[in-house]
Amino acid sequence: MGAVMTSGTTLLLTYRHLQKNVVGKVKTSPGAPKKAKGPRMSMKESAKFLMNSPYIRDLALLVISYGVCINIVEVSWKAKLKV
């Protein structure tokens, strides 16, 4: 129990030190480039943009397929457990 309290206190003090002395003193230079904002797109345009990217399209297909497979397996497994 003492080790947990000691490590927790150490972490809190380290976090406080970093926030007070390190993060607060870091400043951006005045000549730093600002982040450019992209054009605003509607939901339809966003979906069209995402579907034109093969990597994101395949990733979405993978996630949807995983969800469907997990649901099918869970339903059949829970039905088997009730029998």
Image (tube, rainbow, N blue to C red):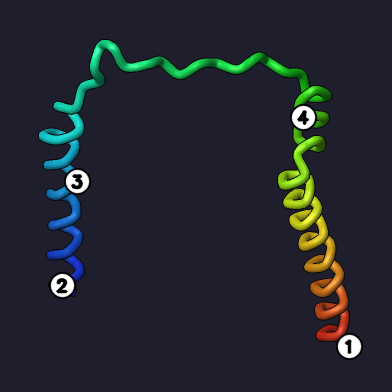
Residue to which mark 3 is pinned: 15
Contact (Cβ within 8 Å) of mark 2 with mark 3: no
Which type of secondary structure does the marked residue at label 4 adopt? helix
Residue 75: quarter of image:
bottom right
Q: 20 or 76: which is nearer to us?
A: 20
Contact (Cβ within 8 Å) of mark 3 with mark 4: no
> Looking at the image, is mark 2 or mark 4 earlier in the sequence?
2
Residues at marks 2 and 4, CA–CA distance in whole angstroms:
52 Å
Which type of secondary structure does the marked residue at label 1 adopt? loop
Q: Amino acid at mark 3?
A: Tyr
Residue at 78% across / 60% down in the picture? 67
Crowd class of label 3 (few under 14; some 14 to 19; many from 20; radius 10 Å): few
Q: Mark on residue 83?
A: 1
> Looking at the image, is mark 1 or mark 2 earlier in the sequence?
2
Residues at marks 3 and 4, CA–CA distance in whole angstroms:
41 Å
Residue to which mark 4 is pinned: 49
Q: Amino acid at mark 2?
A: Ala
Q: 19 or 42: which is nearer to us?
A: 42
